[in-house]
Each structure stands twice: as structure tokens, then as C-alpha cells.
């Protein structure tokens, strides 16, 4: 954890410097600190029916319940040169984007799509020509619909082999020009949103008053999907380090989403609930990556519903990340909750009832628009420092 501690210290020094100064410049940041932007394939590319791309779970999900879709999105597939030019004019030093699995490998496994391959090679070259570091995310919620239909996607261990094969293609084809790899974006939120609450693809959840999911089990599937994500990440990381790292000299990691968390009141119950929320929201992914196992709090609450790592799997997951990406937008209050908490009464057993804590937005934040609360980021790094 020495490298992580160094990174954490750098961030905290930066945050302190910013808080003590009304003006700062690029020179106030370490040379290796990169200012950049990020997006995902489905949000940015568009061109969903062009040049051999096939449907992902995002396409299917977004067409359900009369939702909007990413058929055009930002039209990055056609306008990537314009976008990169704008990035360069802004002075961005890095751009994190994801590979559309079904644009590169239309059937989820098997033959590569030459036009999809060419698009990503051209994008990466355009970035490098303009002095922008490409940071590639392998998976940003857009599983091939064919694999979801075939075996259920992330709730089936078959996904580990298919994801690793997809990663192998990406490492082989792009790795000479890509030095930063994220295997899975916001793995914790993906598992919750997609398999507990049902508001992200493939839209699984138990019947509730909030979402009308056609399938799912919110009491088991988020933990099963999260478990398989960790194993798939570890498998891809192992492949990269054995087969590519010595030549390509890149780094590979996984990212999580991190709310800033603070107790709703000074009560002992809210303080304990905040720690429990840290275990469920952060420790769920971070503890296996560092120690090879889930937090004790999750084991106590979930019992047999929480999958178990074999000894071999534990060793493979532990230390599998060269870095952990922390994605942070806002900070929330945490209030202890029970089965009689009014906001939880309509719910069936799911991630948040298991967590036994209610998250409450601060200020003017809503489900769709979040206030920026700068001190919250410092609190997130504090969690990493104390918990790991």
C-alpha cells in the first residue's frame, strides 16, 4: 500500500493547498498529476447501428419503459477529431473513455470487427498526437446483449472467461499506446444500480414500489454480480501482468464510486450506521482488493447470501490493482434505518435494507442533480487511509 499512501498524501496536500489559497495554477500540482475528462462509450459514441456494432444491454434497457437512448448521444463516433481538438484547446492532459464491447467484438466473443478496431486505434492515435494521455475503461455497463441473453451476464461465472478474452484483445491491439487501464467502472454502483435497484442495465430487481423490474433478486444478485466483477477484474489483471505489462509498461486497476459520508446526527446509532455504510459502499470492493476478503460487517449481515472466495481466488484478487480509481461527486448524510423506517417500508430485501442505513442528500441535491461539496472528497481519502 506504499504507492497508494503516497498518492493519498499527494491528494491531501493538494486539497490543503487549495483550501488555503484563493488562486492556484498548474504549478501548484505535482508534475505527474493529470487534468482530464472522462466519458463512456454509450454516452458518447452514438452510431449504435453502424459499422458492425450490435446491441448491448444499454440499447435494450434504454428502449424499455419509453426511456431515452444513446443512438446518437454526443456523436463521438463521427466527431471524435473535433472533440479531441476541443480537449487540446482546453489544455486537457488525459481522456478516459470506454471500449464498446459490441463494437469491437459484435457477438461478445469470437471475431473482431475491423471497423470497430480501426475506430479505437484512430481515436487513441488522435489523442496521442494532441498530447493527451488515453486512459481506457474496458467495461462501463454495456455488456453484449447476446451474453446477457445466453447466460445472464454478470450473475454467471461464465462472464469471467468472456471478459478476460475481451480484455486480451484490447491489451493486444491497443496496449502499446495505452498505459492506463481501468477494468470496470464504478463496480460497486454498477452492482447496486443494475442488480438491486434496477435503474441501470440490465435492470434487475425484486418487485418494489419504485421500479417495475421483470426479473431479478435484490437480496442476492448484487452480491453475486459484485463477486464476479472482482474475479473478472483479477483475471484480466493477472493476464495483463503475465502477458503484456513487461513490454507495454502500463498500469491496471478498478474504479469505485465514493460518496462522502457523514452522520446525520450525533447519535451513536447514526455513527454506527455511517461506519456500516462505509463497509457496504467502499469496503465491499476495496477490502478484497487489499486484503482478499469482504468486510466482517457484510459477512455478519448477509451470511450465506454473500459469496465466498476460495483461497486461490482470495490470493488472486488481493493486490490485483496497481491503482484504485475513486470517483466522487457529492457527500450525503447517513441515518440509521430499520425495517420500520418510513422510506424503507415499501422495499423488499435489497442492498440498502441490508446496509441498514439511509443516505440523505445535502443542500439542494436531488437524485438527478448533486451539489458539489469540496470537503467531502477529503473525507473519502480519509476513509481510504483509516480503513486500508
Image: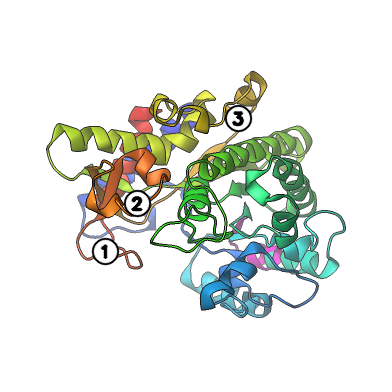
Label 2 near label 1: C-beta < 8 Å?
no
Q: Is residue 135 magenta?
A: yes
Q: How far apart are marks 3 and 2 (CA)?
A: 36 Å
Mark 1 or 2: the one toward you: 1
Q: How many labels does the image show?
A: 3
Q: Which of the 4 quarters of the picture holds residue 334?
A: top left
Colouring method of the image = rainbow
> Which type of secondary structure does the marked residue at label 3 adopt?
helix
| Residue located beneath label 3 in the image | 317
Q: In this view, does 3 lie above or below 348?
A: above
Residue drawn at the location 52% of the way across and 44% of the way down? 222
Label 2 near label 3: C-beta < 8 Å?
no
| Residue located beneath label 2 in the image | 28
Does residue 9 appear in this view?
no
> Which type of secondary structure does the marked residue at label 2 adopt?
helix
| Residue neighbourhood size for the residue with mark 1, other residues' Cα within 10 Å, grouped as few (<14), some (14–19), many (≥20) | some
Percent x, y of residue 300: 40, 25
Q: Is residue 216 left or right of residue 12?
A: right
| Residue neighbourhood size for the residue with mark 2, other residues' Cα within 10 Å, grouped as few (<14), some (14–19), many (≥20) | few
Percent x, y of residue 9: 36, 36
Amino acid at each position: 500500500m506504499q504507492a497508494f499512501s503516497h498518492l493519498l498524501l499527494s491528494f491531501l496536500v493538494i486539497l490543503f493547498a487549495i483550501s488555503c489559497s484563493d488562486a492556484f495554477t498548474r504549478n501548484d500540482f505535482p508534475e505527474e498529476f493529470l487534468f482530464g475528462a472522462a466519458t463512456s462509450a454509450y454516452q458518447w459514441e452514438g452510431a449504435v447501428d453502424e459499422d458492425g456494432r450490435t446491441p448491448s444491454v444499454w440499447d435494450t434497457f434504454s428502449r424499455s419503459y419509453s426511456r431515452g437512448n444513446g443512438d446518437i448521444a454526443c456523436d463521438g463516433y463521427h466527431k471524435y477529431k473535433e472533440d479531441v481538438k476541443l480537449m487540446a484547446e482546453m489544455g486537457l492532459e488525459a481522456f478516459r473513455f470506454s471500449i464498446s464491447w459490441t463494437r469491437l467484438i459484435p457477438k461478445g466473443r469470437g471475431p473482431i470487427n475491423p471497423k470497430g478496431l480501426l475506430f479505437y486505434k484512430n481515436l487513441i492515435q488522435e489523442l496521442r498526437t494532441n498530447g493527451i494521455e488515453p486512459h481506457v475503461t474496458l467495461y462501463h455497463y454495456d455488456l453484449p446483449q447476446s451474453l446477457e441473453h445466453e447466460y445472464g451476464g454478470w450473475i454467471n461465472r461464465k462472464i469471467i472467461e468472456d471478459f478476460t478474452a475481451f480484455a486480451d484483445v484490447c491489451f493486444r491491439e491497443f496496449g502499446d499506446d495505452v498505459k492506463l487501464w481501468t477494468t470496470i467502472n464504478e463496480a460497486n454502483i454498477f452492482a447496486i444500480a443494475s442488480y438491486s435497484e434496477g435503474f441501470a442495465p440490465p435492470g434487475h430487481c425484486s418487485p418494489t414500489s419504485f421500479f417495475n423490474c421483470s426479473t431479478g433478486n435484490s437480496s442476492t444478485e448484487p452480491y453475486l454480480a459484485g463477486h464476479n466483477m472482482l474475479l473478472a477484474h483479477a483475471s484480466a489483471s493477472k493476464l495483463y501482468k503475465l502477458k503484456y505489462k513487461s513490454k507495454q509498461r502500463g498500469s491496471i486497476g478498478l474504479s469505485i464510486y465514493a460518496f462522502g459520508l457523514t452522520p446525520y446526527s450525533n447519535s451513536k446509532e447514526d455513527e454506527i450506521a455511517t461506519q456500516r455504510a462505509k463497509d457496504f459502499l467502499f469496503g465491499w470492493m476495496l477490502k478484497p482488493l487489499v486484503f482478499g476478503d469482504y468486510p466482517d460487517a457484510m459477512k455478519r449481515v448477509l451470511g450465506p447470501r454473500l459469496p465466498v472466495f476460495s483461497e486461490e481466488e482470495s490470493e488472486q484478487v488481493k493486490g490485483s490493482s496497481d491503482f484504485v480509481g475513486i470517483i466522487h461527486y457529492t457527500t450525503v448524510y447517513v441515518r440509521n434505518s430499520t425495517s420500520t423506517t418510513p422510506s424503507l417500508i415499501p422495499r423488499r430485501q435489497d442492498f440498502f435494507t441490508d446496509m441498514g442505513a439511509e443516505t440523505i442528500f445535502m443542500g439542494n441535491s436531488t437524485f438527478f442533480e448533486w451539489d458539489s461539496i469540496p470537503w467531502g472528497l477529503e473525507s473519502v481519502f480519509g476513509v481510504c487511509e483509516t480503513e486500508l
